[in-house]
Image (cartoon, rainbow, N blue to C red):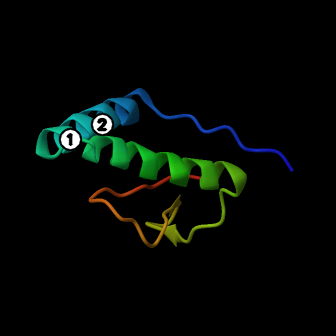
Amino acid sequence: MGFYEIELSPKTSLELDKAYEWYEERLAGLGSRLLKEINKYLTTISKNPKLFQVRFQCCHSPSKQTLACICLYVA
């Protein structure tokens, strides 16, 4: 079984950059922790996009997220 390709929209990439900077301004290393968490979810999603529950009618979302952000995606 292969991995699914994940595409981030330009707006999503910009939001991630802004979030990284915001977290780093609060505490050095926190932005890196954010990106590590997001990468962990993206890896899981690429292996099995339908693993997480459906929220908001068409979007999936992990139920437990450790940082103050929401990961939503369409599978």
Q: Residues within 10 Å of mark 1 (few under 14, many from 20)?
A: few
Q: Give the side of residue 13 with respect to residue 5, left or right.
A: left
- The amino acid type, in three-letter code, at marker 2 is Glu
Q: Residue furthest right?
A: 1
Q: Give the side of residue 18 with respect to residue 34, left or right.
A: left
- Give the quadrant of residue 9: top left
Image spot of residue 71 (x, y percent): 42, 55
Label 2 belongs to which residue? 15
Q: Give the side of residue 72 with respect to residue 27, left or right.
A: right
Q: Residue furthest front?
A: 28
- The amino acid type, in three-letter code, at marker 1 is Ala
- Measured in 3D between alpha carbons, the distance from the residue under mark 1 to the one under mark 2, in whole angstroms, is 19 Å
Residue in front for this viewpoint, 13 or 39: 39
Q: Residue at x 87, y 50 (%)?
A: 1
Q: Residues within 10 Å of mark 2 (few under 14, many from 20)?
A: few
Helix, strand or loop status at disc 1? loop
Question: Any mark on residue 28, and which?
Answer: 1
Image spot of residue 28 (x, y percent): 20, 41
- Give the quadrant of residue 45: bottom right
Question: Any mark on residue 17, and which?
Answer: none
Residues at discs 1 and 2 in contact (Cβ within 8 Å): no
Q: Give the side of residue 35 with respect to residue 25, left or right.
A: right
Image spot of residue 41 (x, y percent): 53, 54
Q: Residue at x 20, y 39 (%)?
A: 24
Dot in front, 1 or 2: 1
Helix, strand or loop status at disc 2? helix
Image spot of residue 57 (x, y percent): 49, 66
**Label 1 or label 2, whichever comes before in sequence order:** 2
Q: Residue at x 55, y 48 (%)?
A: 42
Q: How many marks?
A: 2
